[in-house]
Image: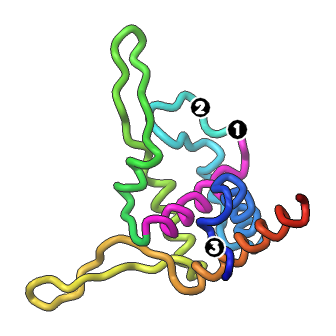
Amino acid sequence: MGVTVKDVPAKEFIDAFAKHLKKGNRIKMPEWAVYYKTACYKDLSPYDPDWLYIRAASVAYQLYMRQKVGVNTLRKHYSGKQRNGTCTEHSRLTAGKCIRYCLIELEKASLVGKMFYENKDGQQVPNGKALTKKGTTDMDRIAREIANKARKGE
């Protein structure tokens, strides 16, 4: 039986898939990424200059695990607590721009596609994003490479 993304540790997979996205020039790093904060409750932008590749790989991982997902669901997934000094903390959503950008770039690389459903009138209405067959096979191939390296290392 083959190895899938669910069989390898998430952190190892996301790091390997981010390297794959960067190496294959699948995602372009925009100018704004250097200065961009990932959420309103953060004080600084990420220290890692390749943070966008890691976020795109993480978004692809979430799409693999959840089958289909929208931007707002991913905003909730990456959300955190905003500190208010002596007042109690409150949960805040993360910024949607980097998630939308990652989804658009993954769609340009033909790893992600739009999901549709039919409404009462029989019209096709967009309903989130999902991985394409190519995206699933790429991710499973990288997971297989990780599993083979772990097997040889033992």
- 55 relative position to 128: left or right: right
Front position in the image: 80 or 109:
80
Q: Do the residues labelled 2 and 1 touch (CB within 8 Å)?
A: yes
Compare marks 2 and 3 and give the one earlier in the sequence: 3
Viewer-nearest of labels 3 and 1? 3
* Point 54% across, 28% down: residue: 43
* Point 68% across, 80% down: residue: 2
Compare marks 3 and 1 and give the one earlier in the sequence: 3
Q: Which residue is farthest left?
A: 120
Residue position for label 2? 44
Kindly identify the amino acid type of the residue bearing the numbered disc 2. Leu
* 61 w.r.t. 116: above or below: above
Per the image, label 2 sits on a secondary structure element best described as loop
Front position in the image: 52 or 79:
79
Q: Residues in magenta?
A: 48-66
Per the image, label 3 sits on a secondary structure element best described as loop
State the separation of the CA atoms marked 2 and 3. 35 Å
Whether residue 56 appears in magenta in the rendering, the answer is yes
Q: Are marks 2 and 3 in contact (CB under 8 Å)?
A: no
Residue position for label 1? 47
Residue position for label 3? 4
